[in-house]
Amino acid sequence: MTSILYSAHTAISYSAPLEAEIARLVGVMTRLTGVNGRFPLRWLAIQLLEGDDTLLDNLAEAEREALATAVAHSRARLHPHYGEDVDLAITDERYRFVHQLVTQVLTAPRATWSLSDRIDRVITNRWLGIPIFLVLMYVVFSLVQNVSAPFLEWVDAVFGGPITRWALALLIWVRAPEWLISLLTDGVIAGVGAVLTFLPGLLVMYLALAVLEDTGYLARAAFVMDRSMSKLGLHGRSFVPMILGFGCNVPAIYATRTIESKSARILTGMLIPFMSCSARLPVYVIFGLAFFPRGGNLVIWILYLIGIAVAAGVGIVLSRTLFRHEPAGILLMEMPAYRWPSARRVLAYAWEESASFVRKAGSFILLGTVIFWLLLNLPWGVTRAEESLFGRVSGAIAPVLAPAGFGNWQASGALVTGLLAKEMVVATMAQIYLGAEGEVEEEPAAAPTFWQDLQEIVGGLGTAVVSAAQELLETMTPGISLFGADTEPGDTALTRVLRQAFTPLSAFAFLVFVLLYVPCIATIGAQTAEFGWRWAALSAVITLVVPWLLATLVYQVGRLAGLGV
């Protein structure tokens, strides 16, 4: 076997275009006294072409500018050969050199593809990777919409029926004042109950994401999306915290600390609010059931894609204006091995996230619903909700939202309380439409007994479990109906009144606005802590202007297309 011996001073030979520019930069640096003699010139030329200019910080301004200009000209000449990926081309040729060296000095058994390698050839394929990612996300949202719907109806019936009746009976028995009865039934139970109604949907989503994470797929999703996001102006490491943003924007903001560049951290932190957090999901689900009963999963999927697309668009604008000097980064991460998801880990993750949601509903959202009820009843004794303090403030905002199709005080008021927590959008609508205004329903001839209520709860749960299992099988076997003809999902009290206040077009425009508008106070606080109040304020302005423009565009174009009816 013939081998080639390499000394410690052997230089890697790059392709002709790269070698020409390396030589040109070395020639420039030999004339710069601040560089020549301080660094190996060939090594420094390669570092500069890769985008590492930190070694030049201590140079005199004239020499630094001359060398920066020379590097810019070199990269421009290399652009026809490698595009924007000069650094990736250098890395690729370096690894190719290492591979050639290893093959000459090492005899190894014939390489075999492991099962993990064969799966990755498909999952991370340049052309198939993104479509596979989008299909999997569609399946996740289909599970959220279809499998959780029977439980959503059951929880809604429990809160709107037995729990409300029991609370009302207890309050009457203790001779509670009328205002306290209204606070607890129209405020606390209607508000928190409306939010907890969507716990089953969130639980399904957390279970699905935990399975994808535990199998090792989500890391590959970050790898697949990285190249596309980088070309759209996003930093190479940005996709990982942005993926976290689908769960909650707050930890995603803190996850930007893994990005070395301060400018890149700020840019990523300003784009994360466009990633649809799980707190927005209850709004999507309730509007999906009300206006898109058989296509709600598709609507939710489209909304998530809109969030990603808007983040990419805003990223392009910011990276070419405020952050135009920020070089693109490279995502380096270890791919975990594929494995069967652990039921223990998956259930633990879903339980932790769901418990966090319940704690928020039981504390922060509870406080918010109480405050909102007070505002809805001030000045004290007001009989019409729109004449209350809250109604007046919401009514003043409503005309601004009219071009987007939802210029009524109820919608604008729900968006205002959504600044506290996005779950409050549903809680507010429940109080306004079901509490303050009420829903006309026929009273039963006789109130059910306690045991009849218990039978209703248990029987409804059993029915929901069977229906959810059927929906799961239907979702996992697309195009095949295993249980007969499709039926429309059941209504809730809130979906019925929403259909009277919105059209399908204005409802979709409203969802687009909810998707993109100012994140919750906790997220703004995290942005302020990490990046400063000026960047947080700029982010708030962007997340007010962009959603208004896009929601207005959706509604007005839809009307011109004849979709406004």
Image (cartoon, helix red, strand yellow):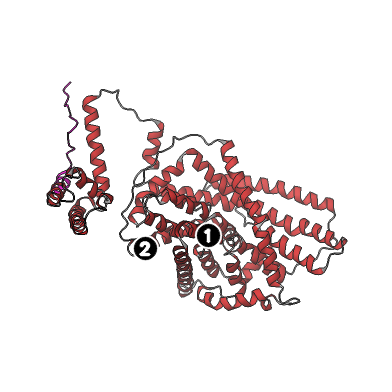
The prevailing secondary structure element of the residues shown in magenta is loop
- Expressed as whole percent of the image width and height from the top left, the position of residue 52 reads 27, 49
- Expressed as whole percent of the image width and height from the top left, the position of residue 248 reads 53, 53
* Residue 197 appears in the rendering: no
Rendered image quadrant of residue 409: bottom right
Above or below, comparing residue 446 to residue 216 in the picture: below
Rendered image quadrant of residue 415: bottom right
In the rendered view, does 221 fall on the left or right side of 94? Answer: right
Determine crowd level at label 1: few under 14, some 14-19, many 20+ residues with C-alpha closer than 10 A.
some
Q: Which residue is mark 1?
A: 525
Q: Is residue 321 magenta?
A: no
Q: Is residue 18 magenta?
A: yes
Residue most toward the top?
1
Judged from the image, the secondary structure of the residue bearing numbered disc 2 is helix
Judged from the image, the secondary structure of the residue bearing numbered disc 1 is helix
Residue occupying the point 50% across, 42% down: 213
Rendered image quadrant of residue 264: bottom left
Q: Nearer the viewer, residue 323 or 97?
A: 323
The residues tagged by marks 2 and 1 sit, at their Cα atoms, a distance apart of 21 Å
Kind of residue at badge 2: Leu
Quadrant of the image for the C terminus?
Answer: bottom right
In the rendered view, does 490 fall on the left or right side of 511? Answer: right
Instruction: Look at the image and give the residue range highlighted in magenta.
Output: 1-20
- Expressed as whole percent of the image width and height from the top left, the position of residue 300 reads 52, 57
Decide which of tag 2 and tag 1 comes sooner along the chain.
Answer: 2
Q: Which residue is mark 2?
A: 318
Q: Are marks 2 and 1 in contact (CB under 8 Å)?
A: no
Determine crowd level at label 2: few under 14, some 14-19, many 20+ residues with C-alpha closer than 10 A.
some
Kind of residue at badge 1: Gly
Residue occupying the point 84% across, 59% down: 170
Residue occupying the point 46% across, 39% down: 216
In the rendered view, does 370 fall on the left or right side of 514? Answer: right
